[in-house]
Every structure is written in structure tokens, then in C-alpha cells.
Image: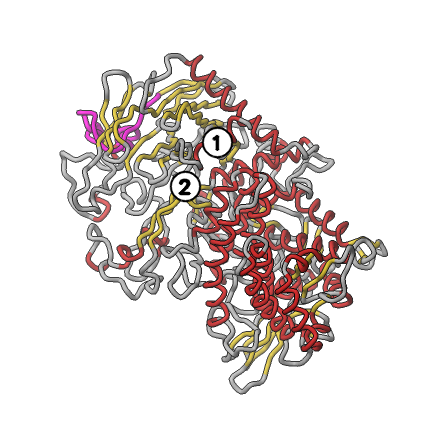
Amino acid sequence: MSIEKNRLAEHYKGKETWLKWGPYLSERQWSTVREDYSPDGNVWKYTTHDMARKYTYRWGEEGIGGICDDKQHLCFALTLWNKKDPFIKEIFFGMGTDGNHGEDVKELYYYLDSTPTHSYMKFLYKYPLNEFPYAKLREENSKRTRKDPEYELVDTGIFDKDEYLDVFVEYAKKDVNDICIRITAHNRSASEVQVNLLPQIWFRNVWQYRQRTTKPVMMSSNIGGILIDHFRLGKMMFYASGANELLFCENETNPSLFGKETDPNSYYKDGINEYIVHGNLNGVNPKQTGTKAACNYDIAIPAHESKTIYLQLTAGHALQSEKAYDHLFDLRKSEADEFYADIQRPVTDKEEREIQRQAFAGMMWSKQYYFFNMYSWLNGDPSHPPETINRMSVRNSDWPHLHNANIISMPDKWEYPWYAGWDLAFHCVPLAMIDASFAKQQILLLTQEWYMHPNGQLPAYEWNFSDVNPPVQAWAAMRVFELDARYAGQPDYAFLEAIFHKLMLNFTWWVNRKDSNGNNIFQGGFLGLDNIGTFDRSAELPTGGYLEQSDGTGWMAMYCLNMLRISSELSTYNPVYQDMATKFFEHFLYIAEAMTHIGEKNIWDEEDRFFYDIIMQPDNSTIKLKVRSLIGVIPLYAVEVFDHDVLLKNPQFAKRARWLLENRPDIASLVSRWREPGVDQKHLLSILFGDKLKSVLARLLDEAQFLSEFGIRALSKEYDDKPFELEYYGVKYCVQYMPGESDIDMFGGNSNWRGPVWFPVNYLLIESLLKFHYYYGDNFKVEFPTGSGNLMSLEEVATELNARLINIFKKNAQGHRAVYGHYEKLQNDPQFNKYILFYEYFHGDNGRGVGASHQTGWTGLVAKMIQPRFE
């Protein structure tokens, strides 16, 4: 067992707390729902980037490349000043609703490495030496329309002459409560520069919000560092050898922010900024004590050279030399290499190993301490203006039970610094490859009573916990269970049983709430696909009536099969679960019957041989929305193949299934190949099979429709020249192919499902194709691409799609990565092109990264895709 694996084992057995400290600090706390106490719910205006220097948060902290403990009592992060900016750089800048495509970070930073226990971590921030173009970014983004691309930091030319610092932040744990920090600033410019490296350490402010809470303190010590005394953490030391000076203030709001007078004897949150940038000696406490501190290294860095500083946060003693620090970092790095070498043994391509390693790093760095007590939040904040009190009519007021205080895998710690239900499920698949215990915790987390609604609904995300995300948790649970069993050598039935019982509650909620007519055709609203519909599917329809959704019904069919798979697995460990397997078998058949029924009022269209949403109007007439999109592809995910020995091991289930199929031959013949064993006596349950399957795949694999060089598009390219149009009482609704950014503001406009390539839905498609191939074997072939005459098995098609998605990040023959599009600096400069950003989604024609730039979350699925399939 590697040293890192041993650390993981020690942690999860309760012997050591190796995960007590980690990269759990958010990258944006401003303009989050948690910190919004406005009477009108205007999140992006209530707390802003400009306010953040002076404003103390209630629910969390933020920083650059930072760490904190697992309850975020004490935080550490990188801070810098280039002596030209109007304020120190202590948080990342980006656009909110003032961006032409919604929120978007305007910085360049990379997650380079991390072990699962965070015993070694590495982060890179590219800091401009010239004045950061805040005004230029705001002005240009405000000018641009939704039809224009986003204006990024690299577009400003700030990096063109290499006048920037590469600032690497590395962490190495000497012990569970002993963290060494190495910050190396490389001057990439042709001139010597003078800069301030200002690593900061501070307490999250709880003393102003909780009665009878002891205020912690940090103060200058007489041994070259900062003494820390916290009522939860105890006494620690923060060593900062060689610092020019130690600066102290309080992590408390400057009252001038709200037009109030300041106390001349108080030292507010922005005091360090006031002292460094404006020379305000009154900004910091001359007694060198407070709840926030900075170590000021005012250093000169010669052209093309670097300077390194060493820090240590410890409950023990400091290392005595730079050589000792470097030895520890080399040791922890070698242990990280050992750990990942074992994981990557089957990956033979060097570039793919590098991509996978950075993807794993992104998964690890995307952990965040998420704190939100809904009851307290709904009752307002006593430190804020009176109108913020008793806001029971605001968003999420029907979730008063929700009390979250956990380390959670985030979609993107700047753009989406809050958990999202279905995103989290996808995160757990690559997470399970390196830390299955954490993945299992994450799967179970949203089903706990302090997350899940009493009615069984899972929370979606903080903007609206009641929104409905696709029910992919059962799928993720089974995949994590399988991966864990493979890597650990034994199945964790306790986990599978626990999640099964919780998901039974959620499944019942879906059946009771989202099948309005009881006809096994489901609604659900936007279901995570933002703008894919002809109109906002979560809002009241302009036509009246309601929407019967192909994707909602497809997801529920998949949910049934996932729960059937779990219950059949559990029945090998406890036969009582055979009854549950029978229940989900029957429910799937009834949904599948409803989906494949032919008629004007059904979502399957026999003429087009594709699935569509249907508007059920108040007068009982229907409008079929014949838009060829992922909405019609999702039913393909509802497929499971069972080996014959599963039936032999579950005789009660096999007997009941046989009885049902014999007595309802209409269902049996319409929807399954259960009684027609495939290769090696396998049994198929699916909505699509045979000719219907080939019909849908003919569209999916058509380059003029869904198939792109980089995967399957979310919307058919046929709508590029001829958009889909629906006219209703003189109002025209349109769906046009948009391969990159969205040009409409539905759901904020920062995501786009009308043409780009998205990893999670492609991943599920690839899995489904492999399941079909497992049943049909090599003799079932389709054209790839459609019309080419080139016949492939479904396994070969899945392999090709898998490769196309990976190729988004690989260098082509010209040495360019599709993910970086037209950016010459990112493509050609060796200080840029070796680092990879894992975007939210990708341009449907050229593979360029679009949306959130650090969404390693579900795009981190590429790590699993790179791993050979048998792994």
C-alpha cells in the first residue's frame, strides 16, 4: 500500500484526521445567495467585489489558492500587490449580471496537483505586473451583447509582453495539524520588479453572530511568527521567516461601507489594504494583535528569476531551514507521484496521464466548506439593516429545515460556489477512483435529513432548492459502489443499502409530484438543461396547460432501472430486496409502455422516430414540440443488461418477472428483450432496441445533426440555417443552433444547451452504448458517421466518442488544444500551454471551452474516460 493510501485508510478508520485541513476555502463568497439579505433578492447587487474588502461574511470565507480547516474556523490564502493596482489582490475578480453572458471569473489560475488527503497540493496564479484591467473588463463586457463572445483577461493584452508573475503555491503536510507552505513567484518579465507577497491568515467571524462565543485571537510572537489561539483549534503557531513585517486587523466590517462613522480605535477588515496601498498607519493595530493578519514580504525579483518564501502553520515546532522545507516538499511530491502512478498504471499515453492528473487535481481543489443555516438566514441578520429581518417570503422559504455545514465537491468554486444536485452525482465517479470513501459520503450527503426535504425532494442549489435536477443519484451510487468494490477488493453493502433506502423516499416524491396525470409520463421543469426548451420549462407555459417531458420521463425510466440494479445487487446480500427489484421492474415496464406508445398524445413520434416534449393544453389538445435535442436522446439512457445468473440468484424476482411478462405480453413485446437472451444468455431492459435504437442513433451519429468532432451536441446542427419555430397567438418562439455561448437570457444566459458539447450527458450516452453492445455483441452495427457506409459495433462507436471528448484537451498535429480555441498565447506559449482548464461545456463545432472555466466537477469525468474501460 502506498503512503498516501495508508493516510486515507488511517483517516477513514478514525486513527488520524488527515482531512482536517484542505482547500476548503471558497473562491467567491460575495454575491452568493447565502450572503444576500436584500429585501428583493438581488444577489449580485447586495454584496459585490468592491465591497468584499470591507465586508465581513456570515456564512463563509473566500481567498486565492487558500486552505482552511474542515469547519472553516481558520483560513489562509495568497495575497499580492504589484504596487500599481488600486487595492491588494486578495480575491478573484469577475463579472456577475453585468457580464454579457452572466457570471464569469476574469483571472488565470490553475489547479496543478493534490493528493486525496491534501498531503501535497500545488496551485498556480498568473498575476499581472501592470495595473489589473478592472475598468477595461467592466467597460468592454458591458458593451457586448449576448451575440458577442465574452471579453476575457487574456483579451486585454495584459500578458502579451510577459509582464506578469507566475505564483506557485504549494502545501505539504508534515502531520495532520502541521502544514508547510511554499510560495514561489517567477518573474516572467524582462525587468526587475518590486512586489508585495502578503500571505494572509484569519478567523471566520462567528463571534458577531453567536452569543456566548469566545472571540479568538492572533498576535505577534517573539519567535518570528503569529501565535493563534482559537476556542476550537487550540493554540497554534504560524511561522513566517523573513517577513518584513506582520500586520494585524480585525475580520470585521468597516461601518463606512454602510455610511456609518468608524471608531478610531478599531482596525477593520480592509485595514491591511489601507496600510499597504495608501500608507494609512491607522489601518493596522500597532499592538500587533487581531483576528486577521498578513505577513508582508516586500521583495525585488530580478528579470526571469524567482523568489521563494516558506511558511508553516503548526501545533508543533517550525522546521529550521529552507533545506528542511524543500526536503519535505520533495518527499510529499514523490508520495503523490507514487499514489497516482498506481492509479495510472493502465494509462499508456503520457499526455493523457498529464491531463488525467490535472483533472484529479481539479476534483480535489474543488472541495469547499459549505455553511448555510436556512432557518437563521430566513430570520435575517441582526447586523444588517432592519428591512433584512423576517424575510419569510424570499427564495427557499419552504426549506427551513436545511442546515448545511459540510465539505462538498463544488461545480466551480468561483462561478458556482454552491453544490448542485446532479452535478455532485457526476463528480463522484472520478472521485471514487482516488477516494471512494469521500465519494460515498458525497452521494449520501444530500439524502440526509438536514438536506433532503421532508417530502423526499433533494435540494437542487441555493438559487432555488426547489428546482428539479435529473434523478441521477441512483446511477452514481451504483457506479461508485462498483468502482469502490473494484479498487478496495470488497463490496460496501452498508453504503448501497443506506443510499437505496433514502432514494426510495426521493423516488416516491417523483412519482407523486411529477406525474400529474398518473400516466407514467413525467414533468420536471428545466431539469438542468437550462435553455434547451422552446421556452422556460420551469415557468408557466405561454400556451397554458402543462408539459409532458421526454427527458423527465426518460430520466425516470433510467431511475427505475438504476434502482432495479441496486435492489438486485442487494438481494445477493439480503434476499428481501427481491421484492423491491420486482417493484422497480414493473414500474419501468409501465413507464416504457407509456413512452413508446404511438399516437399524437405520446412523446414518441413514429414518423420522425424520435422523442419530443408535448404541450397538453387546457382543452385537452396537444402541441408536439418537434425540436431534435438531448430531450429526445435521454430515453436512450434507460438501459440495463442482466446476466442470466442474476435471475438464478434471485428466483423470487425471476418468477414474478416471468409471470408479469406472460400475463402482459403487450408490454413484454413492446418494451423489452427480457425473454430473448442476447450474447451469453444476457437479458435486456430498455426503452429503445432494434430498429428504434438504430433510428435514434442515425440522427445522433449524423454530422449534420448531433455528431461533432468533439462529441455529441446538445441540439441538432440542422437548426443553424433553419431554426425551429413555433407561433402561438401571434407570438413566435424560436430555437436556433448556438454552438458556443447562449444569445438569450434564459436562466441567466451563462449556460447553453442549444448546441454545445457537455461531458455528463455524453458520458451517460457512452455508458448506454456499451450496455447495448454487451447485450447485442459485435453483430449489431450502425453507420459511423451516418451516411459514410462505415459500419461499427456499438462498442466501437462508444470508443470513438470517448476519444473525441478526450481530444478536446489533447494537442493536435499543430500542437494546439481545441479547448483553448483562438487564443495564441494559451496555445503557443510554453508557460501557458502545458496547463489545462476544464470548462463547463464546449463549442459544438470547434471544441473551445465555454462557460465556467474551472468546472472540473462534471468535466472531471474525463479522468474516468481516460482510464481503460476494464479499470
Three-letter residue code for mark 1: Phe
User: Which of 799 and 153 lies nearest the eye of the viewer?
Assistant: 799
Q: Residue at x 59, y 54 (%)?
A: 572
Q: Residue furthest right?
A: 789
Q: Which residue lies furthest to the bottom in this view?
A: 619
Kindly tell me whether residue 736 is visible in this rendering: no
Query: On screen, 519 above or below 805?
Result: below
Q: In which quarter of the image is the C terminus?
A: top right
Q: How crowded is mark 1: few (under 14 residues within 10 Å), some or many (20 or more)?
A: many
Kindly tell me whether residue 597 is visible in this rendering: yes
Q: What kind of element bears circle 2?
A: loop
Q: Which residue is drawn at 23% across and 16% down?
A: 222
Three-letter residue code for mark 2: Glu
Residue named by callout 1 = 123
Query: On screen, 142 above or below 505?
Result: above
Q: Quadrant of residue 654?
A: bottom right
Residue interval drawn in magenta:
272-297
Is residue 148 found inside the magenta-colored segment of the image?
A: no
Q: Residue at x 51, y 35 (%)?
A: 110
Residue named by callout 2 = 27
Disc sitting over residue 2 in the figure = none
Q: What kind of element bears circle 1?
A: strand
Q: How far apart are marks 2 and 1 (CA)?
A: 13 Å
Percent from the top left, x then y, of residue 801?
71, 49
